[in-house]
Image (cartoon, coloured by chain):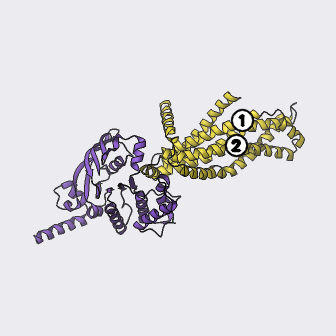
């Protein structure tokens, strides 16, 4: 569980986050959603410690993350995994070596143990046959999957995903969403996903934080989205005419059922 | 401008403290150092060979021209060439050229990693990125650049000798007499000290510019240029200080 307590963040005179209070729950896919410029990425970077909040605290279970020094923060980060928007795979390394890197750096496992773990992680993301390929030789969706494998190789307690579906076709995006959801359940981790993909919201949004101009605009789950009495949420989620029509049909169907 | 310079100098010093932190895992640093030694040392052999050959040849030709009509004995060309190359030409010119080749490469490599979020990815894993990305490069440069400079001095003197004897400026005996006269081993020590200091400067300044690059291709290009420009300026400043202190 990660607790954000009254988080403020300013860059010069610009206030980006204005008092965010939220609990990211363990074993669930927690989503941070909002328009571009709403403060999602800043929030995620504060959660992982790449940015410091101007005010407020981040708690990882019983540890005050904001109060840690650099050394303690690095130790804490070994319990985190992160999937970046552009995957951030090391170009000079093969798929397998990308996944191996955190283990080489931080564990004293034998070569056999490492290989077993790599094979397991690559199998989990269905990339066992691409282990010798280089990032330049694989597709965007595969890169994301390698990124996921790398981020879970050290058995993290917390997984962060920055726009995991950006640049992917809807079908691949769905595969990535399902993968993240399954991993979250399987190893019971706290997953935080930063997205503006509405399919993800409706598919895997178990605990959602909607940001609007740096403020919390709504919190809830995918099940409460459709009936939520929040104008901004409805305008945001059902912004496209297609989704709006779909929602109207769904509501009409519900009414008929009643 | 002075305020900005002081800001960067302070930031550089603070960052250097992080660079010299204890490595997370020695074997990973060792592997990376070997890779960097290959890239910096072996990768620079060709350019060092070419510039050294020309430095020696041009210096010998010009010395012969300048001293040709004077009462200074011809064999002095060998003596002046040797000391000029060992004390100044080999360490300084080689390091200036390497600042262009290695410095821009380091700034682009680290800057690219920053822009593609590789550095953030490593940070999230718990890696001390300043240390992991810079320390192996620095150790590799400190080990290989002095060797390149020693090689450059030998090549320069050799090419100076070859070009002078081929063009008939003086005989082999005259050149060898100059080369073996008034030799002070201390001068070689000056050359090695200069090479080590210049290697430190060009590696850390270039890494600093790459590490703190801002977003965008223009910023990456500027980081490369700044890395070379500031490395060159600092090499020349250090050259003056070492000359004042050691000569």
Q: Which chain is purple?
A: A
Dot 1: element: helix
Q: Which numbered marker is on residue B149?
A: 2
Q: Is residue A238 left or right of residue A118?
A: left
**Residue A159 at what x, y percent from top left?**
36, 55
Q: For this rendering, which residue is in front, A210 or B215?
A: A210
Q: For this rendering, which residue is in front, A172 or B3?
A: A172
Distance in Å between CA atoms under marks 1 and 2: 12 Å
Q: Is residue B144 left or right of residue A245?
A: right
The answer to whether residue A12 shows anywhere in this view is: yes
Measured along the vertical axis of the image, is residue A209 above or below residue A175? Answer: above
Dot 2: element: helix
Dividing the picture into quadrants, the one containing residue A168 is bottom left
- Whether the residues at callouts 1 and 2 have beta carbons within 8 Å, the answer is no
Q: Label 2 is found on which chain of the structure?
A: B
Please count the marks in the image: 2
- Which class describes the residues within 10 Å of circle 2: few (<14), some (14-19), or many (20+)? many
Q: Is residue A212 left or right of residue B21?
A: left
Measured along the vertical axis of the image, is residue B194 above or below residue A153? Answer: above
- Which class describes the residues within 10 Å of circle 1: few (<14), some (14-19), or many (20+)? some
Measured along the vertical axis of the image, is residue B78 above or below residue A171? Answer: above
Q: For this rendering, which residue is in front, A36 or A225?
A: A225
**Residue B47 at what x, y percent from top left?**
68, 49
Q: Are marks 1 and 2 on the same chain?
A: yes
The quarter of the image holding the C terminus of chain B is: top right
**Residue B175 at what x, y percent from top left?**
86, 40
Dividing the picture into quadrants, the one containing residue A224 is bottom left
Q: Which residue is mark 1?
A: B189
Q: Label 1 is found on which chain of the structure?
A: B
Q: Earlier in the sequence, mark 1 or mark 2?
A: 2
Dividing the picture into quadrants, the one containing residue B148 is top right
Q: Which chain is yellow?
A: B
């Amino acid at each position: 569980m990660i607790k954000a307590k009254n988080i403020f963040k300013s860059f010069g005179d610009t206030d980006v986050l204005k008092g965010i209070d939220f609990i990211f729950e363990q074993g669930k896919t927690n989503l941070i959603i909002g328009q571009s410029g709403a403060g999602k990425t800043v929030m995620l970077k504060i959660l992982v410690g790449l940015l410091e909040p101007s005010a407020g605290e981040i708690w990882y279970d019983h540890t005050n993350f904001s109060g840690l020094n650099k050394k303690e923060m690095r130790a804490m980060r070994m319990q985190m995994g992160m999937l970046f928007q552009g995957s951030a795979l090391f170009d000079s390394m093969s798929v397998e070596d990308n996944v191996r890197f955190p283990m080489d750096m931080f564990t004293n496992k034998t070569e056999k143990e490492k290989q077993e773990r790599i094979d397991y992680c690559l199998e989990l993301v269905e990339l066992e046959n691409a282990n010798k390929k280089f990032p330049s030789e694989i597709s965007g969706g595969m890169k994301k999957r390698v990124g996921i494998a790398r981020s879970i190789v050290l058995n993290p307690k917390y997984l962060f995903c920055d726009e995991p579906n950006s640049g992917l076709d809807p079908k691949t995006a769905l595969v990535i969403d399902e993968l993240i959801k399954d991993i979250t359940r399987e190893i019971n981790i706290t997953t935080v996903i930063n997205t503006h993909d509405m399919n993800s919201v409706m598919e895997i949004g178990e605990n959602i934080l909607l940001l609007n101009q740096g403020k919390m605009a709504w919190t809830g789950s995918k099940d409460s989205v459709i009936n939520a009495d929040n104008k901004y949420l409805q305008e945001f989620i059902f912004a496209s005419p297609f989704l709006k029509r779909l929602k109207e049909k769904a509501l009409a169907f519900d009414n008929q059922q009643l | 401008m002075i305020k900005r310079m002081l800001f960067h100098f302070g930031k550089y010093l603070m960052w250097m403290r992080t660079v010299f932190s204890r490595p997370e895992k020695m074997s990973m640093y060792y592997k990376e150092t070997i890779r960097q030694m290959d890239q910096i040392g072996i990768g620079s052999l060709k350019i060092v060979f070419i510039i050294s050959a020309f430095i020696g040849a041009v210096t010998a030709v010009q010395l012969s021209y300048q001293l040709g009509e004077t009462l200074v004995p011809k064999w002095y060309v060998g003596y002046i060439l040797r000391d000029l190359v060992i004390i100044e030409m080999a360490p300084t010119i080689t390091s200036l050229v390497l600042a262009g080749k290695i410095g821009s490469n380091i700034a682009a490599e680290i800057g690219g990693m920053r822009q593609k979020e590789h550095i953030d990815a490593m940070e999230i894993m718990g890696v001390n990125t300043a240390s992991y990305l810079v320390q192996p490069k620095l150790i590799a440069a400190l080990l290989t650049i002095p060797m390149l400079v020693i090689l450059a001095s030998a090549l320069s003197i050799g090419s100076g000798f070859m070009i002078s004897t081929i063009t008939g400026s003086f005989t082999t005996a005259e050149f060898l007499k100059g080369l073996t006269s008034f030799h002070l081993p201390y001068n070689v020590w000056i050359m090695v000290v200069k090479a080590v200091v210049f290697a430190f400067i060009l590696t850390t300044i270039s890494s600093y510019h790459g590490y703190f690059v801002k977003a965008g291709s223009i910023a990456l290009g500027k980081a490369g240029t700044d890395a070379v420009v500031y490395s060159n300026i600092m090499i020349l400043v250090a050259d003056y200080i070492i000359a004042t202190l050691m000569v």
